Image (cartoon, helix red, strand yellow):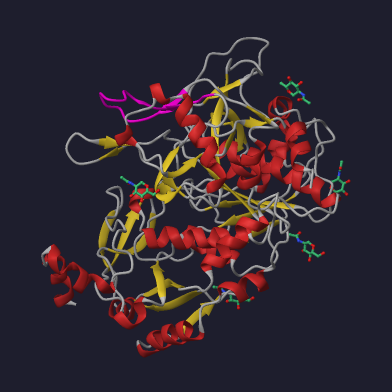
Amino acid sequence: MNTLRQVFCIPLLFNSLVWSGYLENDQDVLIPEDWTDVGRVEPSEELELIFALKQQNVQLLEETLGLLSDPDSAQYGKYLSLEEVASLVRPSELTQKMVRHWLQSHGISNCLTVHTQDFLQCTMTAEAAEMLLPGSRFHRYTRDGHSIVRSSAPYSVHDDIHQHLDFVGGLHRVPPRGKDLGKKQRRSKAGLHLGVTPAILRTRYNLTATDVGSAQNNSQAVAQFLEQYYHPADLAEFMKLFGGTFQHLSEVDRVVGTQGGGKAGVEASLDIEYIMSTGANISTWVFTNPGRHESQEPFLQWMVMLSNMSDLPWVHTISYGDDEDSLSTAYMTRINTEFMKAGVRGISLLFASGDSGAGCRHMDKQQNSFRPSFPASSPYVTTVGGTSFKNPFKVTYEVTDYISGGGFSNVFKMPDYQASAVEGYLKTVAATLPPQSYFNTSGRAYPDMAALSDNYWVVINRVPVPWVSGTSASTPVVGGMLSLANGQRLLKGLPTLGFLNPRLYKLKGQGLFDVTEGCHLGCLDEQVQGKGFCAAPSWDPVTGWGTPNYPALLAALLTD
Ligand SMILES: *[C@@H]1O[C@H](CO)[C@@H](O)[C@H](O)[C@H]1NC(C)=O
Ligand SMILES: *[C@@H]1O[C@H](CO)[C@@H](O)[C@H](O)[C@H]1NC(C)=O
Ligand SMILES: *[C@@H]1O[C@H](CO)[C@@H](O)[C@H](O)[C@H]1NC(C)=O
Ligand SMILES: *[C@@H]1O[C@H](CO)[C@@H](O)[C@H](O)[C@H]1NC(C)=O
Ligand SMILES: *[C@@H]1O[C@H](CO)[C@@H](O)[C@H](O)[C@H]1NC(C)=O
């Protein structure tokens, strides 16, 4: 252990030699300051770590996703079962054997695998983990009554194992703080609407009373990772107050994971109440993972779960993100592969674009740049931004919500499906773009579309609460409408929409209300003065292609 700690003092010259055992060189290992280090864990304490085994045929998986999600391909919608995904990506015999042998030689045999055999979740003592992963030192950290166990230093793996693993989960990434779903108080005016409700959304997006789910085998889900819970009684109360005008369900069909007790969270209530309002009368699941074990990464746990369930809802909405620059490329690349595995199964993953506009990263000296967030910046998911009504007291057209996350990835290159749309934007607004040093025009640009994100009513702990805002509101709203479209497709015997982006970008805005006004937040510095990007006609990195005009979008999504 001591010799390994010295490694960090060796000059850069030797890095390629001694760091060869590190799987995640670029992972941020600093625990955010709001967590308190309460000391090293006892050697005998049990940890749960996840080993991401190197998969086969990842290139082929990507090509397959391209074909299955391209409406002009003969393969469109010919989705794979979990079994078929497993035979494609399952790690080689050698990889499986090497990893198991390595674990066993450290006395680690308590492992669960998944259907695709590309993850192993193992229980071991802290002592065994530190022997297995030289460099790791497990500490307990607490914040607001929650505690986690993470390593205070980077881990390495034996050279023989290096090529067989993508990364080990449970050492570094910490759950982000629940977002402040800010309450921007506004004056009221008599006779005009005060905040977004299901009825307001259904009016704005042209959903009629008959636009509710009716297909037998349709389903949708929200996934939550912030130790927040929805309360069934809140959902029931919400639907009693706000669900009067349309046929809906008032109960969740299935909760996967552990629902904690205690107070309901705003975020959790918001997600479930609104996906069930646009995606009305559609069977809805909640994936909730309060981090049953202190050493778990809840988001990763969810990804592992998807690889182990053959029967999943078709649409998942997720309000979760980290700064792209805090995550290792190895981790993000592997998570992208997991997104592809879902996509080839016909599953749509929708992520909130974030609530900090373009974001801001303070680089060295006086230099700032924008700060993309992941998974919003993944080329393999559909990312949803946010808008406000032009007049907050009326159902008017929509403008940018200044918090709407958007920008360009610094890690993932721009996927083909969006190249011409983004090029068009960069040309149109060339004269008014932020300085080039703030963003990377060769990266995956997001969001892909948007919906209202400002000023929602939510029922929490039995009380209706106004002024809830964020892209965690717009994402389930879009997800519900995508589910409705899926339902109509299923009734026609068509496959589900799956990974939507290739099709969405081919529509070139058809079926969407283009958002062309307003800018989102950026760095508060002299150069950009708080401004990121601005909306413009057609696609833009603030609101994507715009917000759904449901009947027109449905027509465009029902053609084949
Ligand atoms: C995956 O599911 C199987 C049962 O189908 C179960 O035995 C196994 O423990 C699960 N794996 C994980 C990681 O939970
Ligand atoms: C949908 O809503 C818009 C604006 O609210 C309206 O102009 C339009 O006529 C509506 N109907 C359709 C089918 O687009
Ligand atoms: C609600 O969905 C069920 C199928 O899950 C369907 O039988 C029923 O007709 C739907 N209700 C309406 C009003 O379409
Ligand atoms: C879809 O239908 C299949 C077969 O009829 C059934 O086993 C499954 O539970 C349904 N899936 C969902 C997610 O509702
Ligand atoms: C810009 O993005 C590309 C990938 O699209 C990446 O290779 C490059 O390093 C990025 N540049 C910066 C300055 O982050």
- In the image, is residue 537 above or below residue 93? above
**Viewer-closest of 501 and 123:** 501
Residue 253 image point, x, y percent: 73, 55
- In the image, is residue 513 above or below residue 297? above
Residue 466 image point, x, y percent: 57, 27
- In the image, is residue 90 above or below residue 318? below
Q: Which residues are magenta?
A: 519-536
- In the image, is residue 86 above or below residue 380? below
- Residue drawn at point x = 61 percent, y = 46 percent: 501
**Viewer-closest of 106 and 45:** 106
Residue 57 forms part of the magenta stretch = no
Residue 132 image point, x, y percent: 32, 80
Dominant secondary structure of the residues highlighted in magenta in the image: loop
* Residue 88 visible: yes
- Residue drawn at point x = 70 percent, y = 38 percent: 237
Question: Which residue is at the far top?
Answer: 190
